[in-house]
Image (cartoon, rainbow, N blue to C red):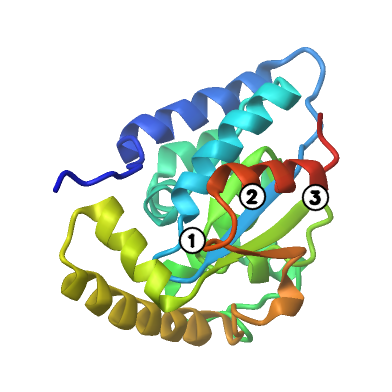
Amino acid sequence: MRPNVNLPASVEERLAGWARIQEGRRAAPTPVAPGPTITLSRQFGCEGFPLAQRLQERLSAATGAAWSIFDKALLEKVAQDEGIALRILDGLGDATRSLEAYGFLPRGAITHDAAFTKVAGTLVKVAQQGHAIIVGRGGAVLCQRLANAFHFRLEAPEAWRVASLERRLGVTREEAERRVRVEQKARDQFLTECLGADVSDRSYYDAIFNNDRHSVDQIAAAIQAYLKLP
């Protein structure tokens, strides 16, 4: 069986594209006001990245602005890339100040792990700049107090998530079942330890969608309507 996957472009390619967008905004004669940011949380096996891609297409067309998708790999790359940090992110302050400004302290809710603290600070800065779609990494928790951030979550019955992984990744049902069990538990434990918060807490989200009952296109249209964009 041939896998049906929606894979992101290489991290380097996406990083270069995002850097060009940000540098273009900084060089514009008239400062560009920050746009909205969307965070997407999902149970393991839900179609988070395909939804992010569809949102990127719809929102770029609706607003005329370039939207960027940030998943784990890209956020970690931006956080570690000193050249990107110096050109684009330094004007917004360091990671600790970004977190403190929104109620998250490295010695409080945020883990002492320096690597995650740096990624978390980068995530907040990216969200502040707007026109960003942030997939995972506790974005709804970290950006909860940002006025320009809107938070959505995908959930679905376990059987549906297993079937979705089996189809999209081209793995056996047994492997898909194993991944759903193991990866969901590992993800929940990681975020709970790092954030001191339960990302499944529904109070963090503007809306929660059942991925079993609603397609990626339907969910993207609903989110666009929620943001009151054309």
Give how far across and how far down residue 28 sits, in percent.
Answer: 72, 15
Q: Is residue 94 above or below residue 31?
A: below
Between disc 2 and disc 3, the foreground one is 2
Question: Of residues 48 and 127, which is closer to you in this image?
Answer: 48
As measured in the structure, the alpha-carbon distance from the residue carrying label 2 to the one carrying label 3 is 20 Å
165 sits to left or right of 190? left
Give how far across and how far down residue 179 sits, in percent.
Answer: 26, 74
As measured in the structure, the alpha-carbon distance from the residue carrying label 1 to the one carrying label 2 is 28 Å
As measured in the structure, the alpha-carbon distance from the residue carrying label 3 to the one carrying label 1 is 20 Å
Give how far across and how far down residue 227 sits, in percent.
Answer: 81, 44
Identified at 35% across, 42% down, the residue is: 6
Q: Quadrant of residue 207?
A: bottom right
Question: Disc 2 marks which residue?
Answer: 219
Mark found first going from the N terminus, 2 or 3: 3
Mark 1, secondary structure of its residue: helix
Question: Disc 3 marks which residue?
Answer: 148
Which amino acid does the dot numbered 3 rest on? Asn
The furthest residue to the front: 213
Give how far across and how far down residue 192 sits, in percent.
Answer: 52, 85
Which amino acid does the dot numbered 1 rest on? Val
**Residue 176 image label:** none
Question: Disc 1 marks which residue?
Answer: 119
Mark 3, secondary structure of its residue: loop
Mark found first going from the N terminus, 3 or 1: 1
Q: Are marks 1 and 2 in contact (CB under 8 Å)?
A: no
Residue 90 seen by the camera: no
Disc 3 crowd, CA 10 A, few/some/many (<14, 14-19, 20+): some
Identified at 74% across, 55% down, the residue is: 150
